[in-house]
Image (cartoon, grey):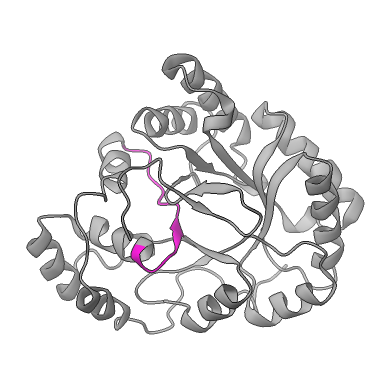
Amino acid sequence: MTLTSLQDRVTLNNNVNMPWIGLGVFRVEDGLAVSDAVKTAIKAGYRSIDTAAIYENEEGVGKGLKEALAQTGLSRKDLFITSKIWNADQGYDSTIKAFQASLDKLGLNYLDLYLIHWPVEGKYKDTWKALEYLYKEGKIRAIGVSNFQIHHLEDLLKDAEVTPVINQVERHPRLTQKPLQDFCEKHAIRLEAWAPLMVGGLLDNEIILNIAKKHEKTPAQVILRWHIQEGVVIIPKSTKEHRIIENGNLFDFELTADEVAEISSLNQDHRTGPDPDKFDF
């Protein structure tokens, strides 16, 4: 896979192009913290920002986007903005309202990607119908899901008119999600990783450290590069300028097939976040 910059994109199943790497803003405080992180990322070459209603920082993201566009001369169409519908707002009518609320907070007139944040039983199908409506109305360029297991996807696909473009899930070398990735690939659904660095939990792993030393890269860069070479979109989170830049600097080296396999062998099906089948909705 030849990737040359943060602007490189993957084509989703509806022919929309999405950057391989975005900035995640989970648990980044609204206001200056998040708007500065967004501005730093865009100036560093990032074109994708991933937020959600439950993060309660969409206004700060919107402010950062507006200021970054003014400072860089980029236009809205250069960016790829994702948000997500929270569990309490799921259902057809409430999803339409929640989507508009997110759009207003972000100060945008459309979203590039809108995801169902968690598979709330008995509600996610109606929520999906609302996303399909918004998609067909041109309010969203692409629609997808997050934290869906294989059985959730099978259930959704039975009635869906539009196939999700993305399934954003926890994924890192301790949780490679291979069966889920295989299922998604079969249905042309792209996997996207949240917590791609396992919240820093693998940065002192000996296998990762040895590979990093060989390539003269940081452990974080090696793990992020592994995701991309596995065909997975990533949204590493940081508010620190040097980390945001470091996390995006993945294009001057390539892991060998053996190194990719070695990193994948660290899998233990270990989650740092909630299990979607046991999540308390």
Residue 205 appears in the rendering: no
The location of residue 62, given as percent across then percent down, is: 59, 28
Q: Which one is nearer the viewer's eye here, 43 or 12?
A: 12
Residue 45 appears in the rendering: yes
Residue positioned most to the right:
93
**Image position of 205 (left or right of 14):** left
**Image position of 117 (left or right of 194):** right
Magenta span: predominant SS is: loop
The location of residue 122, given as percent across then percent down, is: 85, 72
Q: Which one is nearer the viewer's eye here, 49 or 33?
A: 49
Asked whether residue 178 is drawn in magenta, I would say no
Q: Which residues are magenta?
A: 229-240
The location of residue 281, given as percent across then percent down, is: 73, 67
Q: Residue at x 15, y 55 (%)?
A: 217
Q: Residue at x 52, y 84 (%)?
A: 179
Q: Is residue 28 above or below residue 164?
A: above
Q: Residue at x 20, y 49 (%)?
A: 252
Locate residue 121: give its quadrant: bottom right
Q: Is residue 66 above or below residue 272?
A: above
Asked whether residue 230 is drawn in magenta, I would say yes
**Image position of 148 (left or right of 200):** right
Count of numbered circles on the image: 0
**Image position of 214 (left or right of 196):** left
Q: Quadrant of the N terminus?
A: bottom left
Q: Residue at x 43, y 61 (%)?
A: 195
